[in-house]
Image (tube, grey):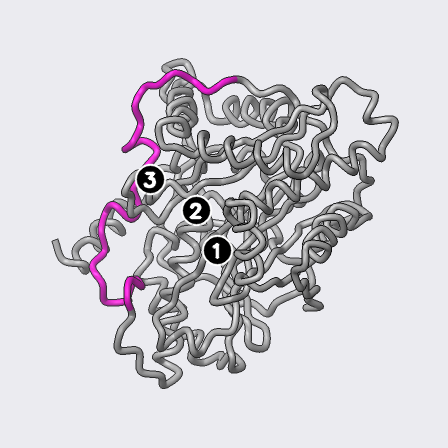
Amino acid sequence: MSKKNEIHSFKEKGWIELDNAAKLFPAIISRDLTSVFRITAILKQPVRYSALREAVAITSERFPYFNVSLGSGLFWHYLEFTGKPPRIQVEEDIPCTAFAVGRKDEPLYRIIVRSNRISVEFIHILTDGGGALEYLRSLLYTYLTLYGNRINSPGDIMLPESQLSEEEYEDSYSRFFRKLPPPAKSDKAWHLPFSLNERPRLRVLHAEMKVSELLNLSRRYNVSITEYFVAVYFYSLQRIFMSDIENSKKKRKVLRIELPVNMRNKCASRTMRNFSLFVLPEIDLRLGNYTFEEILTSVYHQLRISSEVKQISRFLSKNVSYERLFFIRILPLFVKKLAIAAIYRGFASKRFTGIVTNLGKVNLPEEMASMVNDFEIIAPPPNPKIKVCAAIVSYMDKLRISFSNITKTNELERLILRHYVEAGVNVKILNL
């Protein structure tokens, strides 16, 4: 089937089902808990609006499964084709603001522009960081060529004229589902004792380090950059826990971090929709205080074991199994939403102390890389239990960490970044 016929077939159907992960978000999103994340490309030249507007129109045609709004049926939500490109907006002070998901006439993603910055903001109903990054790389290619640049070797970027595959908009959770024993249940975790900001609550702190320095540091301990960062995060959480005498006397003494894992490589999937699962490293302070080296050793082994495909697939099996239960399928949508929201508030949101998202290394063809300075990612605003989360992305020899914080203090960020400074890494705080 030709690309034109495949797109026509997609439009004719008019809708697609939500993937397994996406079914959570319509029940929990709010003005504060927006489930919206941002990925930004920082160019070496100011953005030319006319070229960007044309590039957005061309790119949105290549990704028709993103040009959808949220519809509601009797039993499930679904994504309804709109045929309209995303809005292009000027960047404002507060990122990742809520979408009006009830609107039927515009997609659930937007393009944000400021100076030399092009950002995409997606609601997690559509995709995760892996899918959003592929869209942004395609948009950058089209924009830079319209700007007058020749890119002869685009590599693996999804080009406007490339073939559209049905696999791009499949629910890979269902495709790779097989019945497995469920993962072990997690106790409720300890949470930061910080007071919340007044609305609008979200504040973002950006920091930059050199990948080469981080590699030198992590290689001293024979761990990855991610494993080292998670250990620093735990060590900083432990210091806050021990300084808060009132909370340290409570029974809830488990610190747990949620770390998303891109499943596309593990399962050979080409989907552009959500396909992430999570590993959940933890330290139990009922056993006593940990040195940094003890935490690092524990994190190293926990991540290596839990991210192995057989282990992490147990979460996929658990999530899809619930969705396929007969009594769940026949419940009316409004009952499902009430139940999902109650479970999230009462259990899911209390299992984690923090969240660390690592988008990994962004690769661009050499001809494009010379025109792009940097990338950054901002995670969705954390819920009032977790309060602070971190998102990481690297490009060339730069690694950016963005902390999303809804509290009145930057104590956690200060402890994490000070650890790196004391370890000999140059840390630059970015005033954006």
Q: Residue at x 70, y 49 (%)?
A: 416
- Judge from the rendering whether residue 9 lies leftward or rightward of residue 367; answer left or right: left
Task: Please state which of the two labelled residues, at mark 3 or mark 2, is closer to the viewer.
Answer: 3
Q: In front here: 383 or 9?
A: 383
The residue carrying mark 2 is 126
Residue 1, visible in the rendered structure: yes
The residue carrying mark 3 is 266
Disc 2: CA contacts within 10 A as few (<14), some (14-19) or many (>=20): many
Which of the 4 image quadrants contains residue 137? bottom left
Residue 75, visible in the rendered structure: no
The residue carrying mark 1 is 109
Type of amino acid under label 2: Leu
Is residue 425 placed above or below 74 in the rendered structure? Answer: below
x, y percent for residue 291: 70, 35
Type of amino acid under label 1: Tyr
Type of amino acid under label 3: Lys
Between marks 1 and 2, how big is the CA–CA gap?
Answer: 8 Å
- Asked if labels 2 and 1 touch by Cβ distance under 8 angstroms, the answer is yes
- Judge from the rendering whether residue 409 lies leftward or rightward of residue 34; answer left or right: right
Image: magenta residue range? 155-184
Where, quadrant-wise, is the C terminus in this rendering?
A: bottom right
Going from the N terminus, do you reach mark 1 or mark 2 first?
1
Going from the N terminus, do you reach mark 3 or mark 2 first?
2
x, y percent for residue 261: 45, 40
